[in-house]
Amino acid sequence: MEFYKVYLLQHHLYLPADIIARLGLPLAEEMEVETATGIETVRIFQSATLALKGRETQSRCIELPEGESAIVGLIPLEKLRLKLDVENQQLVEVLARI
């Protein structure tokens, strides 16, 4: 997938329904959640492989409507040991702690 957004206020990986179907990701669970517009069913899928900047991790993902941009949240970025350089609008490596 070429286009994605990074949102630090979001915590998870979010993928559009058409991408989830193309990847054949297995459904993990459905949850009822309360939103500003009422109760909605959210579908969560497992076993998505996320690869960015030469790094790779496995992550569950939350389904977005078809045609939406993928969203990479804080938890997947941390698993990849990446962070957003807001000033330069790019992902950068997090140095290992000693």
Image (spheres, rainbow, N blue to C red):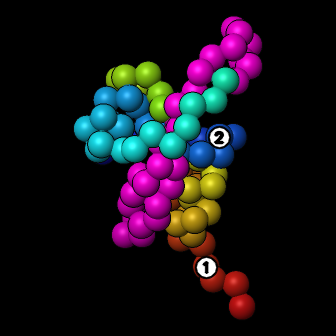
Q: Quick one: quadrant of the N terminus?
A: top left
Q: Are marks 1 and 2 in contact (CB under 8 Å)?
A: no
The one nearer the camera, 18 or 68, is 18
Q: Which residue is mark 2?
A: 10
**Residue 69: x, y in percent?**
41, 32
Q: Specify start and end residues of the magenta stretch as a single range.
A: 33-62
Vertical order, 76 against 13 (above or below): below
- Quadrant housing residue 37: top right
Q: Is residue 72 visible?
A: no
Magenta-drawn stretch contains 5 = no
**Residue 25: x, y in percent?**
36, 44
The one nearer the camera, 73 or 33, is 33
Name the element at disc 1.
loop
In this view, the mark in front (1 or 2): 2
Q: Is residue 79 visible?
A: yes
Vertical order, 63 against 10 (above or below): above
